[in-house]
Image (cartoon, helix red, strand yellow):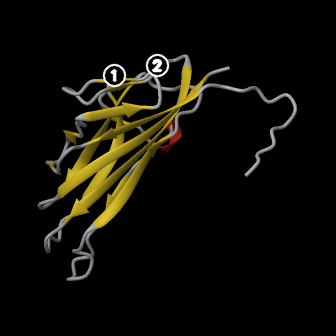
Amino acid sequence: MTYLMNAGTLSKNTRLYELSLSSDLFLNSGDVVIFDTLRSSSAGGLSYNTTTGVITLNSSYTYMLWASVDITRSGNTGSFRVAFFNEATNSEITTSGGGYDVTWNHDGGTKGTGNTTLQAHYVPDNDQLSNVTLRAPLVSGDANTNFSMIIIETEST
C-alpha cells in the first residue's frame, strides 16, 4: 500500500509505547491503575513510574493515549468508570482538556453481567499536561480487571 503526502508536509519521528499488566488487577473506587510493563518502539520523551502510576509527558512531543480495560464480572451487577487524571491538581481531565472517560452502568436486570471491554482516551490539545494517571473513580461491586494502554508520541513542530 502506498501513502501520498501533501507537499509541504514535514516528516516527524513517531514512537509507540505499550503499558500493560502481567496479571489481573482488583480495583476499588479512586484507585490509580499501576501498570507493571512498559514497552516502546524506541527511546523517547515519555517516562512512567511503576510505583505511582504517573505517566510523564514531555513538552517536546505531542501524545495520544488509549487505555483499554477488560472487565471480568461473575454475575455482578455493579457499575464501573475509568478516566484520566491531572496529577498536579488531582482532578479528572474532562473533554474540554482532551480526556474521554468510559462508564459501564449496569441496568439492574440479569443482562449485562458478562465480561466487557471499554476504552478511555486522552487526546490533549495545545495545553498538554505533563503528569497524568489512569484511575477508576467509580467501582461498585466486584470488578476483576486487566488493563493495557497504547501511547503514540510524535515530535512537536
Residue 79 appears in the picture as rendered: no
Task: Tell me the tag on residue 141.
Answer: none
| Residue kind at label 2, given as amino acid type | Gly
Residue 69 percent coordinates (x, y):
31, 53
Position of 74 with respect to 58 (left or right) is left
Quadrant housing residue 70: bottom left
Pointer 2 local density, CA inside 10 Å: few below 14, some 14–19, many at least 20: some
Q: Residue at x 51, y 39 (%)?
A: 98
What residue is rendered at 36% in x and 39% in y? 84
Q: Relative to 120, is 77 on the left or the right? A: left
Q: Disc 2 vs disc 1: which is toward the camera?
A: 2
Badge 1 element: loop
The residue that label 1 is drawn on is: 88
As drawn, the residue found furthest toward the right would be 7
| Extreme residue in the bottom direction | 110
Res. 45 mark: 2
The answer to which quarter of the image holds residue 72 is bottom left
Q: Quadrant of residue 139?
A: bottom left
Amino acid type assigned to the residue bearing label 1 in the image: Ala
